[in-house]
Amino acid sequence: MAAARHPVLYARWGVADTLDGRFDMITLHTFLALDRLKGVEEGFRQDLVDELFLDMDRSLREMGVGDISVGKKVRKMAEVFYGRIAAYDQALEGPEGALDAAIARNVFPEGAAGDGPGRLAEYVMQQRGHLASQDTSGIARGTIRFQEPTP
């Protein structure tokens, strides 16, 4: 969560500092963790996603969303989350520029000002390399470390 809240993402790279923008950054960082653990810790991967949505449920309730609406909102968030995970997975397998395009489409749906999508795509690739060097069992225990984004 701390990495998803880093000020550079919002102040320098143009991610909207809104509920949607923050959800997009949580999704992107969760994608990085899931990607790192692909084929290694399947049970943990599902536990991570389950915990993410339990936290989303708690957060919505704390913000005052009514009990009746919470389930619908969480289901919609799950649809968005899984759509983005699939898009980023496909983009990593796609041609050069595919990740930039996926990020632009998902994180900057109103159009990006400046180089935000490219910077985020670069950040994703740097983080993938950084996470690859971390011990899998440590990550599964919750000691994942993301690098600071460079302004």
Image (cartoon, rainbow, N blue to C red):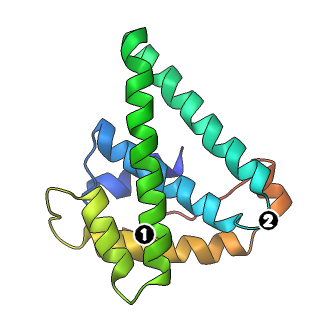
Q: Is residue 151 above or below residue 94?
A: above
> Could you tell me residue 132's position as x and y percent?
70, 74
Numbered-mark total: 2
- SS of the residue under disc 2: loop
Q: Quadrant of residue 83?
A: bottom left
Count residues near mark 2 (Cα–Cα under 10 Å), then give few for <14, some for 14-19, many for 20+: some
Asked if residue 36 lies left or right of residue 57, the reply is right
> Could you tell me residue 95's position as x and y percent?
39, 89
As shown in the figure, which amino acid type bears the numbered disc 1? Thr
Label 1 sits on residue: 150
As shown in the figure, which amino acid type bears the numbered disc 2? Val
**Residue at (45% x, 15% y) in the render:** 61
Pointer 2 or 1: first along the chain: 2
Asked if residue 106 lies left or right of residue 88, the reply is left
Task: Tell me the number on the disc at residue 40.
Answer: 2
Q: Is residue 94 above or below residue 109?
A: below
Quadrant location, the N terminus = top right
Residue furthest right as drawn: 137
Q: Is residue 149 visible?
A: no
Q: Is residue 26 visible?
A: yes
- The mark closer to the camera, 2 or 1, is 2
> Could you tell me residue 98's position as x and y percent?
35, 80
Alpha carbons under labels 2 and 1: distance apart: 30 Å
Report the front residue among 19 and 67. Answer: 67
- SS of the residue under disc 1: loop
